[in-house]
Structures are given as structure tokens and as C-alpha cells.
Image: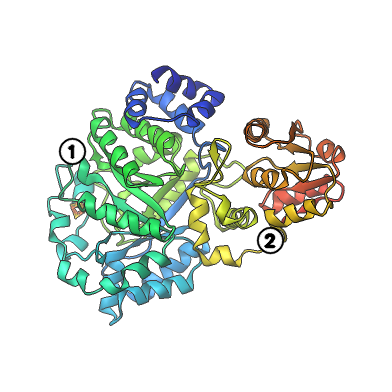
């Protein structure tokens, strides 16, 4: 495995091969631990490319804190929504704010859902619903983050001071919280020696099962720890719970000898192992954020002042403290470390809308964890979007099923060009199987075109050709040309270059 992993760092084709192999977490963690920092970075990047891993970079924003006014949490949520950032929900703080305003936590959560349309990412959720914590925990100034590693357990014994009687009072609303959410986080660091910090694994399992029952994405939060045995225990527990997304926590919880090498390697290994192809961090000092982004992080969870994620990412021992407004700082760090590609870094509302359109076109039943060939269609993001008002708002003009009906009626002819070779083209090609003789795939990125053609040839019984990144020629050799991009500006550009294009938007 060591040789395969090293080769996957050097070569994108080898990474594609590795992504399709059955993988043992122990072998991956061990192989990645042998890599130099630059190799780990290259490896992580190869797994942050279509179709191996989500290639977007985004921010999640913690909008709440127990001592916040209602007007402030609502405004923070609306601001996050306006920039297209998912809202990270610290359930205990929602419950505390609601209580201070004479409301039930679930009613405040519903109000936020009605005011916003981006995904809601639920955290600090236990067997009875939102976890409830005493004042010295919710008002903690970020003691462990400010002190720095090594973390030897929460000095305030956070998890054991939960107010369970209060939690039990809200049990009737438990399922409603999960139904409203797009994703649900569970913390598995109890298997990494943090029994005073995170709930027991059995409680995490119960919440993961609840999330899965309602079709929500499961995120597993785990520490870098020693970067070796601890990390492996975290990955193993997360996979066993059915996690889709890994959230890697560094900061005081990164106790490795060389913190930055360990963080880069943890991100690279997570990229290979995350079933839902998305890797985030909810706690990382500035240097870890930077190296993590270089090694392929998709998301950084940050926050408004008072929210604990407001200081957990982007600062350093001595500067990380409650009250920091991390959001602009993290946004700046991302802009400095990640180059814009087809999409901006971090993504904004327009990109989220494009993604939602893609899910709508292909049909939610066809996306991750569903596969075409050896690879899942889309990633965990594609599932998150389905439970958002934004998904219901965005419009499209045709679905993959509609294209299939057109082909059935003979409206598309024998040869169809699919312009844009990403996941939408995969599902369209499959829907066209049996109704047309030949598909031509054209994408401006030759690697995307290659990998799509190779995967579809292995999965479908029809003639599939490469268009050589030439949309115009591909369209002229076909009876019909379908523009597959769901980003309006790119869709328009492709459409202008061909005669009678069929747009899905
Ligand atoms: S884990 Fe750290 S930030 Fe949280 S309560 Fe304990 S000391 Fe404070």
C-alpha cells in the first residue's frame, strides 16, 4: 500500500486507481505517515479533484452563543445565508437563547429555517436533543485553545457536566431537530482519549443512526491526536458509525511531534477515506488552517464573536479566545491559500445554487451514495442540499428523466454530445443508454473528459467517445448537443459556441 499511496501523490491517474480500491484505514494511515509534507499535500490535492473528492472550498458559520440576543442570532444567520455559507448550529446555544426569550429551542430553530435557505449543520446534539451545559462551560473563554497543546482532557470536564434533566425536557422535539437539519455531527474523540470532552460512542452511534434514518449526512468529528494511533482509532470509529464526512480537529488536540506535518497527513488520509468525499475542520490554528487547505480541506467551520468556532479556527495559542470574529479572518486565509478554479474560494451563493441545480437535474435518488461505475455521483454536499429551501427554490428547465423521455421519443437522434463532462453528464449518459447509439463527451479539462469517458465505458453498454475538449466539433458530429454545466455563465458560454444547444437551465 505504501507504494500505491506514494504513487497516488505523484500521479492523478494512480490516485483515481486508489480511489476505486477497497481500503483498510490502518494501511492508509500507515502509508500516509511515511510521506513527506509536500507528498501529503500533493496526495490530498489529487483527492480533492473530480471525481475522487469534492473540489470546492467553503466556510460553515457558527451564528449562535448562549448569551446572544435573539435579534443577533437571527441577523447572523441571515448574513451567513446571504453569502451562501452553511450555518453551523451549536444546539445548546440555540436552546439557551430560546429559553432566555421564553421559547422552545425547536421554535427558534424553525424560525431560523424559515428565514434562511442554506444547509443547517447540527452539532452538540445528544440522546435527548440539544445538549445543555452549565454556565462555566458555555461561557468558557476558550481555555484549551488559548493554552495550546497538549490537550489532556477538558479541564472543566465538559461532557460530564451536562444538564441531563434539562435535556430530557425537550425529548419530544428530538426528531424534528434532525428533520430540519441537512447534516448532523457526532464526536468520536471519546475513542481517542477525550472521554471528558465528547459523549460516549454509544450516544454518537444513536445520533448517527437517527441522522441516517432521516437521510441526513453524518459528520464525524475526530482529533489529530498523536497523528498515528489516535487518528486511526478516530477514523475507524467514524467509519463504523456510517460517517460520510470527516471533520478533523487540530488546535490543542493536535499533540503530534510535528504538528503541521501531522495535520497535512491527517487531511490527506481523511480525503482518501471519507466515503462522502468531503473533509472539514472545526478547530485548527492559523498555521494548521493554511497547511490543511493546501492539503485539500474542503471546509473550515468558523463563527461570529461569542460563538466558540469564532476563535477555534485561524488563531494561535495566546490569541485564540472567545469574542474573536473568525469569519472574515478565515475567509481571508482561504483566499490566500486556495486559488479560484471554476468556482470561487470560498464558494458563495451562486456556486451553492449551481450545485443544487445539478442535484435537481440528475434527481436526488441518483446521487451519493449511489454510484455509476466505480464512483459515487457527487458527494455528501449533494445530499445536504436536498433538505434546504434553496434546493426547492432554484429552477431548471429539464431533468435527466426528461432527457431520457426525449430520447425515447426519438427527438435526440442516434448520437448525442454531452458538453461538460462532470457528474451531470454521467447520469444523462446512463439515462440515454438503450435509446441512442453513441455519446460524445467534451470537457474543457482533458483530465475530466478522460476520467468520465473511462468510467462510463466501464459502466454502460453503448459507444462512448471523447470529444477532445472541442465542444463545437463534438456538437457538429452529433444529432443533439446537451450543455451539462449548471453554472449559468459557463452554460451560456458553451451554448454560444454550438448550434441549437439543449440547455438544462
Ligand atoms: S473543551 Fe476547551 S473550550 Fe471547551 S469547555 Fe473545555 S476548556 Fe473550554
Q: Is residue 504 visible?
A: yes
Up-down: is 369 above or below 140?
above
460 on left or right of 409 = left
- The quarter of the rendered structure image containing the N terminus is top left
Label 1, ligand 1: CB separation under 8 Å: no
Q: CA distance from mark 1 to mark 2?
A: 51 Å
Label placed on residue 150: 1
Label placed on residue 43: none
Q: Are marks 1 and 2 in contact (CB under 8 Å)?
A: no
Question: Where is residue 273 drawn, in percent x and y?
Answer: 40, 36
User: Helix or strand or loop: what does disc 1 sit on?
Assistant: loop
Label placed on residue 396: 2
**Residue at position x 21%, y 69% from top?**
167
Question: Where is residue 44 drawn, in percent x and y?
Answer: 45, 32
**Residue at position x 76%, y 38% from top?**
439
Of 267 and 448, which appears nearest the observer?
448
Amino acid at each position: 500500500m505504501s507504494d500505491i499511496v506514494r504513487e497516488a501523490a505523484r500521479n492523478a491517474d494512480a490516485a483515481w486507481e486508489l480511489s476505486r480500491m477497497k481500503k483498510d484505514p490502518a494501511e492508509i494511515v500507515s502509508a500516509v505517515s511515511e510521506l513527506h509534507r509536500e507528498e501529503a499535500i500533493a496526495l490530498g490535492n489529487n483527492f480533492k479533484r473530480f471525481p475522487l473528492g469534492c473540489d470546492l472550498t467553503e466556510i460553515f458559520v457558527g451564528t449562535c452563543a448562549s448569551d446572544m440576543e435573539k435579534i443577533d442570532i437571527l441577523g447572523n444567520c441571515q448574513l451567513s445565508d446571504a453569502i451562501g455559507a452553511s450555518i453551523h448550529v451549536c444546539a445548546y446555544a440555540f436552546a439557551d437563547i430560546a429559553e432566555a426569550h421564553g421559547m422552545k429551542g425547536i421554535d427558534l430553530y424553525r424560525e431560523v429555517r424559515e428565514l434562511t435557505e442554506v444547509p443547517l449543520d447540527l452539532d452538540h446534539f445528544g440522546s435527548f436533543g440539544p445538549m445543555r451545559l452549565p454556565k462555566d462551560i458555555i461561557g468558557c473563554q476558550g481555555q484549551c485553545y488559548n493554552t495550546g497543546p497538549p490537550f489532556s482532557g477538558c479541564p472543566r470536564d465538559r461532557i460530564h457536566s451536562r444538564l441531563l434533566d434539562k435535556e430530557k425536557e425537550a425529548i419530544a422535539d428530538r426528531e424534528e431537530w434532525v428533520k430540519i437539519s441537512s447534516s448532523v455531527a457526532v464526536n468520536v474523540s471519546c475513542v481517542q482519549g477525550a472521554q471528558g470532552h465528547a459523549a460516549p460512542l454509544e450516544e454518537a452511534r444513536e445520533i448517527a443512526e437517527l441522522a441516517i434514518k432521516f437521510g441526513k449526512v453524518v459528520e464525524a468529528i475526530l482529533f489529530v491526536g498523536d497523528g498515528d494511533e489516535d487518528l486511526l482509532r478516530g477514523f475507524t470509529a467514524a467509519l463504523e458509525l456510517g460517517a460520510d464526512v470527516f471533520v478533523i480537529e487540530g488546535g490543542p488536540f493536535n499533540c503530534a511531534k510535528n504538528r503541521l506535518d501531522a495535520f497535512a497527513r491527517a487531511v490527506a488520509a481523511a480525503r482518501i477515506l471519507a466515503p462522502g468525499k468531503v473533509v472539514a475542520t472545526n478547530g485548527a490554528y492559523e498555521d494548521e488552517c493554511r497547511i490543511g487547505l493546501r492539503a485539500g480541506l474542503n471546509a473550515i467551520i468558523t463563527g461570529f464573536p461569542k460563538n466558540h468556532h469564532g476563535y477555534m479556527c485561524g488563531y494561535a495559542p495566546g490569541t485564540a479566545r472567545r469574542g474573536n470574529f473568525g469569519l472574515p479572518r478565515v475567509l481571508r486565509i482561504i483566499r490566500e491559500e486556495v486559488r479560484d478554479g471554476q468556482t470561487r474560494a470560498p464558494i458563495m451563493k451562486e456556486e451553492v445554487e449551481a450545485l443544487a441545480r445539478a442535484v435537481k437535474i440528475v434527481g436526488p435518488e441518483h446521487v451519493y451514495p449511489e454510484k455509476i461505475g466505480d464512483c459515487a455521483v457527487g458527494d455528501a454536499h449533494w445530499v445536504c442540499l436536498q433538505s434546504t429551501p434553496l434546493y426547492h427554490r432554484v429552477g431548471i428547465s429539464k431533468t435527466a428523466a426528461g432527457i431520457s423521455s426525449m430520447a425515447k421519443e426519438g427527438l435526440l437522434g442516434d448520437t448525442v454530445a454531452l458538453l461538460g463532462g462532470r457528474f451531470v453528464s454521467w447520469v444523462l449518459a446512463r439515462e440515454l443508454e438503450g435509446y441512442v447509439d453513441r455519446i460524445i463527451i467534451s470537457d474543457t479539462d482533458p483530465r475530466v473528459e478522460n476520467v468520465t469517458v473511462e468510467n462510463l465505458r466501464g459502466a454502460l453498454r453503448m459507444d462512448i467517445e471523447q470529444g477532445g475538449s472541442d465542444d463545437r466539433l463534438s456538437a457538429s458530429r452529433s444529432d443533439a448537443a446537451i450543455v451539462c454545466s449548471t453554472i449559468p455563465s459557463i452554460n451560456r458560454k458553451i451554448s454560444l459556441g454550438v448550434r441549437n444547444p439543449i440547455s438544462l437551465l
